[in-house]
Image (cartoon, rainbow, N blue to C red):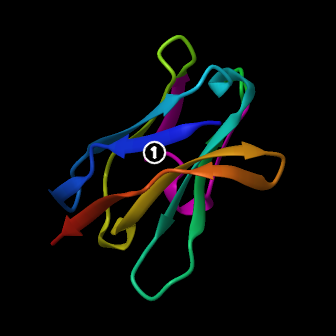
Amino acid sequence: QVQLVESGGGLVQAGGSLRLSCAASGRTFSSYAMGWFRQAPGKEREFVASISSSGAYINYRDSVKGRFTVSRDNAKNTVDLQMNSLKLEDTAVYFCAATVGSSVDYWGQGTQVTVSS
């Protein structure tokens, strides 16, 4: 079993940066691909970024490409999301997830990111 705890959310002005971190418990962390998702009020949860178990393969949704960077440290059981040039539309609750294929096995509890004008 894997437990995921996100941190690093907060309030930031448009154009600013935040770094989210997801800490995982369990010895199987390195076997999972990890994803970041977000959910804005009144909207469905959407994919933001993913990183393979080794870190060799990375994907982003188009709207965050060039602004967000996902990384992981399997020795520390962490996966991070560096978010730069934040926009109002990035406001959401951000979740990390442990994935197998297209399925999410475990979710974190989420961390709020609010971008103000």
Q: Is residue 29 above or below residue 89?
A: above
In this image, 55 relative to 89: left or right?
right
The local secondary structure at tag 1 comes to strand
In this image, 72 relative to 81: left or right?
right
Q: Position of residue 23 (x, y in %)?
A: 43, 32
What amino acid does circle 1 point to? Answer: Phe
Magenta region: which residues?
A: 57-72
Q: Position of residue 20 (x, y in %)?
A: 35, 42
Q: Nearer the viewer, residue 50 or 14?
A: 50
Identify the residue at horizontal 48%, vertical 55% (top origin): 95
In this image, 104 relative to 79: left or right?
right
Q: Residue 8 magenta-drawn? A: no
The reply to whether residue 32 is visible in this rendering is yes
Res 56 → quadrant: top right
Identify the residue at horizontal 45%, vertical 45% (top origin): 68
Q: Is residue 4 above or below residue 46?
A: above
Q: Is residue 95 above or below residue 59?
A: below
Identify the residue at horizontal 16%, vertical 59% (top origin): 11
Residue marked by disc 1: 68
The reply to whether residue 83 is visible in this rendering is no
Q: Position of residue 19 (x, y in %)?
A: 32, 39
In this image, 76 relative to 97: left or right?
left
